[in-house]
Image (spheres, rainbow, N blue to C red):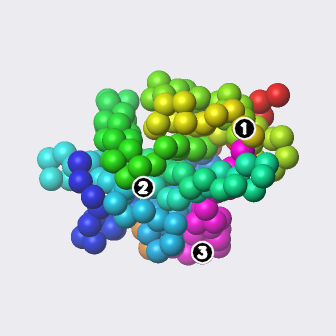
Amino acid sequence: MRNEQAKDLREVEELTRKAFWNLNVPGCSEHYLVHVIRHHPDFIPKLDFVLEKGNHIIGNIMYTKAKLIDEENHEKQILTFGPLSILPEFQRKGYGKALLEYSFEKAKEMAYDVIVIFGNPDNYVSRGFKSCKKYNICINEDFYPAAMLVKELTEKYLDGRKWRYIESDAYQINEEAAEQFDSDFEKMDRKFQPSQEEFYIHSHSKII
């Protein structure tokens, strides 16, 4: 595992595309998101890692800054990550776990205390993530998304006060630009698969 370098950029975009193609929607835009994040001021290059095996990159994770705001408008800078990409043929073999744990240690060394992500709980609760409701972290007014997950890098750092999560606008991508970007890659068939319905359910659910 090492930091992403300039020579890796296209290879990482290609592996991200393969990892997410047809996973959440027909096709994907995560490879364009990777491309956009690298140029955004919230991007943290020191927390942009690739995992190599046999001289080929098989995984990538990148982090951006985010923040929490309490009811007295005090702000806390935190982290979010994504996309986390592992080539399909190497998924479910522990590589994603290894990349996560390595990045957690590096983030702690940089004095970050909290990570908030949107993801499938099945993939992240084993890595120490818990429901945002348990930490009293919401979006908007009292909305606790089922897919919003929180990990304390510093144990018991969150003290129970109510926080509102503010994601970086790096994740607000232009779908038309994403389509144009994708046209420069190898053609792949777009199709429906059950994981897309699972994604829809998770992304539209909330904790009461």
**Callout 2 touching callout 3 (CB < 8 Å):** no
Q: Left of 111 or right of it: where is 55?
A: left
Sooner in the amino-acid sequence: mark 2 or mark 1:
2
Residue in view at x 26 percent, y 66 percent = 5
Question: Does dot 3 land on a helix, a strand or a loop?
Answer: helix
Q: Amino acid at mark 3?
A: Ala
Residue lying at 58% horizontally and 44% vertically, measured from the top left: 116
Whichever of callouts 2 and 3 sits on the residue coming sooner in the sequence is 2
Helix, strand or loop at label 1? It is loop
Picture residue at 68% right of the left edge, 28% below the top: 134
In the image, taking residue 58 as reference, residue 161 lies left or right, namely right
Q: Is residue 178 magenta?
A: yes
Q: Nearer the viewer, residue 74 or 6?
A: 74
Residue occupied by mark 1: 161
Number of residues whose C-alpha sits closer than 10 Å to that of mark 2, classed few (under 14), some (14–19) or many (20 or more): many
Closer-to-camera residue (28/173): 173
Which residue is labeled 3 in the image?
177
Q: Residue furthest top?
A: 126
Please state the extent of the stretch shown in magenta in the rendering: 163-181
**Residue 117 x/y as whole percent:** 57, 44
- State the residue position of label 2: 62
> In x, y percent, where is residue 203?
70, 41
